[in-house]
Amino acid sequence: MKKGEVADTEPIGIKVEAGKSYWWCACGRSSNQPFCDGSHAGGEFEPVEHKAEKNETVWFCACKQTSNRPLCDGGHNALAEAEKPAGIENTVEIAQRENGPLVVKQLEKFYDPGGNAIETRLVMALCRCGHSKNKPFCDGSHKEAGFSSANQRENRKGRMHTYEGYGITVAFNPLVCSHAAECARLNQEVFDSNERPWIRPANGDEISIGTVMSACPSGALSWSPDGKNLRHEVGDKTEIRVEKNGPYWVRNIAIDDVEWAEGASQSKYVLCRCGLSKNKPFCDGTHRDERWRDDE
């Protein structure tokens, strides 16, 4: 029998009620693990019923490789070891579920708005509809909310604007800017939206402008300190940070099925978390305009 995708390498304990039926996800794609949320539709998998005989805690298989479906048979122990051999780093990746969550695999560094570490699992479904009651994790609310993951921009490339001064070139693509305002916070002499032009490299130097380039979470800003090739300042951290009342800040993680804007960084970008962006999966700053909040 074909086994589903690995959702996690640890079983999930659920307190069940006698006489009640529970439908276990067999495909591994559900955002409501260990239970089915309909993600198998149109495929070869079907959910498996577990009818509780008594009130107890049942350990459901989350790796989907069990021979005792839907219950854990301990096989995840060997699987977990195989997933990460000693001394070898696994590849972190983000997959998009159509009209559903962002599925992140192998992430180790995940931080809340205060910089505190969030406990990670081998596979995590992150909310991007803005309605989950368990943010940043998905709780299936996208279905009731009628969330659409479609990109609504006709021009997905945007337009690059360049600004020069004293041998330094700064480039900006407003399409992918999330309006985090790190640039103005760190160097308002160079980055001031109340001035025209709003970017004035001649008012700064390599150190001060380079600091802003490193802090910009979206990759909307790139620069050339010598007037030659433009570059982004990304660093070597592989992580996701949750902005308070804002998007996910992603560094050095691959994401599937996207069209990159002109000059955008594929190593540093921000993903919509409020569900309101017209440039999904990327944030376009709409959360700020609509005053979206985490507790909504």
Image: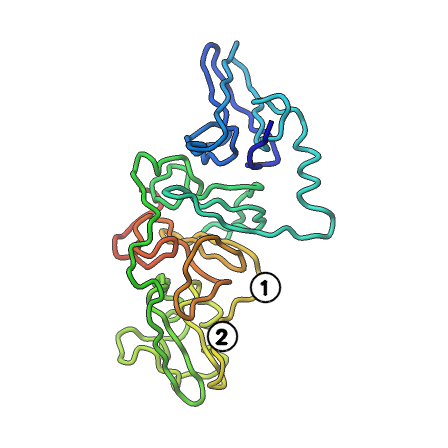
| Residue 219 location, quadrant | bottom left
Q: How far across and down, in percent of the image, does residue 238 sit?
A: 56, 57
Q: How far across and down, in percent of the image, does residue 283 sit?
A: 36, 57
* Label of residue 29 in the image: none
Q: Residue at x 43, y 53 (%)?
A: 248
Give the camera-side residue of 188 and 106.
106
Q: Is residue 110 left or right of residue 284?
A: right
Q: How far across and down, in percent of the image, does residue 102 sit?
A: 44, 46
Q: Residue at x 47, y 22 (%)?
A: 23
Q: Residue at x 51, y 13 (%)?
A: 52
Q: How far across and down, in percent of the image, does residue 182 sit?
A: 40, 67
| Of labels 2 and 1, the one closer to you | 2
* Label of residue 231 in the image: 2
* Label of residue 236 in the image: 1
Q: Amino acid at mark 2?
A: Arg
Residue at the extreme bottom: 166
Q: Is residue 227 left or right of residue 3?
A: left
Badge 2 density bin: few <14, some 14–19, many ≥20, Cα 10 Å: some
